[in-house]
Every structure is written in structure tokens, then in C-alpha cells.
Image (spheres, rainbow, N blue to C red):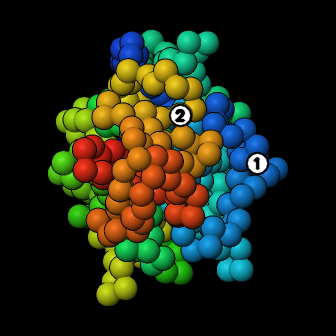
Amino acid sequence: MKHFNTLMLVALSLMTGNSAIATEGVITLDLTNPSNPETLNFEEDGAWDRLYEDTNLQYDFFEAQIFMMSHLGWNEYNYWDGFAPCTSTDMTDKSSYTAGCMAGGGIALDENGNVITDDNGNVTIDPSAPYLIGYYSTMMSADPSCKILFNDGQAHEVVGVYVTNFPTSFYNCLYGNGYARAFVNGDKFTLTIHGIASDQSEKTIEVDLVKYEDGMLQAIRGWKFVDLSSLGAVESLYFTMSSTDSNEFGMVTSAYFCLDKLMVKSNTPSSIGNTLASAKNIIYDRDSKELILPQSEFAIIYNAAGQKVMAKEGQRISVSCLDNGLYLVKTANCSMKFIK
């Protein structure tokens, strides 16, 4: 069994939760309620059964409520990055990169979808509740690997989110291993949350998952609530990581974190069911993968990088050939962002 180094004064901060948050008009990420239930099944150890399913080296998205979480899988090399749902309660140092969180499980919700807390504001753990593991990678794409979009194509005011450490990363910082070293005074392992507004401006919030300061190692071991209200209204979120244990190739600390119960303020819901409409009368029908224009018009479609990917005339334009992602469609009279 591993023990703390008696030469170090180690303080492991629980930092779990805070007072109850008002939830009126708030949408809370609940992975027990996925948009496509058949996509969220788990192995015996709690790992997602689609963790390594090939996505053709492109980011795909799985959904719950209005939230879309990025994921890339590469079966040939047992590789994945982005987000993955998980139900594991494992908190041990088993050097697994598929399951586990230092909180010991997901966060419990009441029958109204509100986070359950005790008298001290600490969240209640539900061992059966799925949560998200994030793996931050700069290897596979120029785009951020850990992205969360909204499937209604609208901007939403961010309220907050709960985060905790992934076991392998936590024990990297605490003890080191064959690659990472144990943290010493001045070291930090940081999660940065980026919010992208409609005008493409960006704001960030940093969370120190582990830090060694004044002779004490402080680490998040339970679910910590992070207030994200300063990000304002965002069209998307993405997550990056940094560590003082880095070399010329990048981070040495394993770049994982855990996330649960992201909260945003809801917009006025669409009256078209599974069809998304904009105030400018362009409609994206998610079932048929078609754009429906107010009249027969010439439309140009751009990807998230601003590159033109399609130009076509008509009143109904199929976008089934496009990769999943965020797009902008423009006509002579109107424009709209949509997510395929």
C-alpha cells in the first residue's frame, strides 16, 4: 500500500459543493437522460462501451438534453480523447485510462432534476449516475478535443459545473510514476474552461485541480462547484489543461479530468419538436438533415473555421454529406448557425 511521504505536509482538500443553487429556468446536464439511450451503455467496470469505437479520426458528438459532448475513438490503437460518459466508482490508483473519479461516483438529482446537497452544501453521490471523463489532447486535431456545444444552435448563459480529479492524474501528482513526477512546492495541475460567445469572443476560468503551495499539496477529491457565470452567454465551451510537470513534448501529467451537472440558463424552447428554427426563418430539420429556407434561395454554408463547405440553390438543402459539427448558413436575406 502506498503512504504519504512523512517529509511532506500534505493536505488533501475535499472542496465539495457549496450552498444550493437556484435552478429555476436552468437546464442541468443529466446523463441518465441521453437523447439517444442506445448510445450510453457501460461495461462491467463502468467504462463506456463505445469508448474506442471508430469515429474516422473526426470528432463525433453524443447528446443529453441540449448538450453535445465531443468524442474521438480509434479502435485500432485503443485510443480516445474528448469526453466519455462513465459510471465507475473506482478511486484507486490502477493506472486505468477508461473509468473512475476521485468523488466516487456521479452526482444525485432529485425528482425535479435539482442537485441534492446535505446541510453543509456537499453533494450527494449516486453510484449509478453517469458523469463525464475528459481527456485533453493536442495530438489528433487542431480543434479543441474537449468541446461542449448546444443542439438548439442558440447561445446560453452558463451557470456552473462540478469538477473533480481523475484517479490516474491525481496519483500522478501525488506519487509520480515512470513518466510523471510527484509534485513539489510550486507545482500546479490546472483545468481551463473556455466560453465562446456569439461574436466569437472568448472568456476563461481556471481551476487548480492539484497544487503544491506553501509546503502543502491541495487536491480536489470530491465534486467541486465552479461558478461559470462570468463567462456570460456562450455558443460553446471547450476545456484545456496544463501542468508544471511538462517537457518539450507537452504535459507529462496525465491530461484527464471529471465533470458533472453542467448548468446553463434555458432559452425559449422551439415549438417544432426535433426541428430547430431561428428567428430569421431558416429551419434545420435534424431528422432529415435538411436546411429549409424561407424561399428558394442561393445559400452558402461555412464550417466552424470559416471555410466554405457547400454552396447550393433551393428551398430544401440536404447537409447529410457534411461531418458533424457547427456550421453557418448564409443567404442574401438571412443567416443561421446550426449543429449537425
| 258 lies left or right of 279 | right
Residue at image x 37%, y 74%? 142
Determine whether label 2 and label 1 are within 8 Å by CB.
Answer: no
Residue 234: tell me if it is visible.
yes
Residue type marked 2: Thr
Q: Position of residue 102 (x, y in %)?
A: 54, 46
Which of these two is toward me, 73 or 46? Answer: 73
Q: Position of residue 248 (x, y in %)?
A: 32, 87
Above or below 145: residue 214: above
Label 2 CA crowd tier, 10 Å (few <14, some 14–19, many 20+): some
Which SS class for mark 2? strand
Which of these two is toward me, 257 or 154? Answer: 154
Which SS class for mark 1? loop
User: Which residue bears the numbered disc 1?
Assistant: 42
Residue 103: tell me if it is visible.
no
Above or below 84: residue 293: above
User: Which residue bears the numbered disc 2?
Assistant: 275
Residue at image x 50%, y 47%? 316
